Image (cartoon, rainbow, N blue to C red):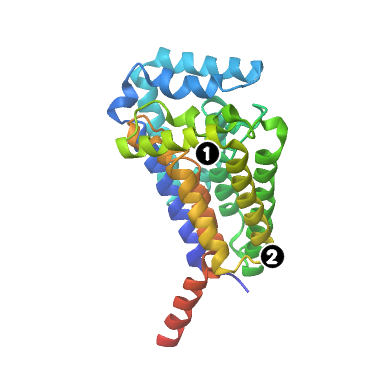
Amino acid sequence: MTMPFDRRRALTYGLGLLWIFDALLKIQPDMFHALLIANVLAPAATDSQPPWLFHIMTQGARLWISLGMLSNILLFIIEALIGLLILKGPDSRAGRLGLWLSLFWGAVVWIFAEGLGGLVSGSPSFIQGSPGSIPFYAMAAMLLLQRKDWWTEERIYNVARYGLAIFWFITFLWEVLPSSGFWTPQGLAAQFGDITMNGNEPTLLQMAINAMVITSQLHPVLENAIYSAILLMLALLSLFRPKSRWTWLLTGAWLFFIWAIPQAFGTLFSGTGTDPGMILPFALLIWTLLGSQFPFMRHNLTHSKQAS
């Protein structure tokens, strides 16, 4: 049985609008400031990256500087075009072109701007933003490139269920392995401070971030044990109780916490946020692939069917 078209269409609209939103962020006034390199690109390039990746990222930063304002305009045009093409739908030639372009351009962004999402830094961390936003954009694009008859309820449910369980378990390993350094005050506090301790966030948000940095330094073992337990619990719940209300309440609360505090809402309030971060595309995938599995949505669907 083929899935309802609405789920596939929701992912199409969500992905297209995310790319357009990313494009609009590139033409914020502060994005044309000379400090953009120091505040946005340089930290990603210097965040414990191996020499070969550091060299690639610094070359990209130099190219950005050499192009000046033109770099922002070009990024806006590319990403807006990708979004508009995707909105045409995956069954159209324009839509499929947009999806392929998003995969190509996403690879460029993931390497030069996101530094492979910190995966080769030696201490990747979901809390700090690994694997970056681009893998979730790419996953959405690859799903939409599949034929419409591939989108069956059973297949998509299993892809989402096992995919989430594996992903959460990998993030658990990142957090719990001693080699990552997150059991130490400096290592754990860095997950909150590297991105957001620049003082550019709204006062209340900055105070919350600073508080988490301080508590991480005071109680690193306890806090990291809590974070690790949450990630392991999400992996187990996604695998064995994917339809449970508690699974999705915990997932939603955890994603909001990560997006709000350590990732500072993707630094959208700083004026130099280049995208909303990885949480929104990740949440979009969860909602569109498992949306009808949410208890409250199943309830609403039942009442809708009875009313019709």
Say which element carries label 2. helix
Against 189, is 227 above or below? below
Percent position (x, y) of residue 285? 53, 54
Residue position for label 2: 240
**Is label 1 in a helix, a strand or a loop?**
helix
Q: Is residue 16 left or right of residue 166?
A: left
Q: Quadrant of residue 72 in the image?
A: top left
Q: Is residue 259 left or right of residue 268?
A: right
Determine which residue is flagged by label 1: 101
Q: Which quadrant, please, contains the C terminus? A: bottom left
User: Splitting the image into 4 quarters, where does residue 208 fall?
Assistant: top left
The reply to whether residue 65 is visible in this rendering is yes
Q: Residues within 10 Å of mark 1 (few under 14, many from 20)?
A: many
Which mark, residue 253? none
- Residue 80 in view (yes/no): no
Residue type for callout 1: Leu
Residue extending farthest to the left is 29
Q: Name the spot of residue 266 as percent of width and height, x first.
A: 43, 38
Q: Residue at x 54, y 31 (%)?
A: 217
Q: Nearer the viewer, residue 261 or 222?
A: 222
> Where is residue 219 shown, x and y percent of the image?
56, 37
29, above or below 91, in the image: above
User: Label 2: how many residues lie within 10 Å, few (<14), some (14-19) or many (20+)?
Assistant: some
The quadrant the N terminus occupies is bottom right
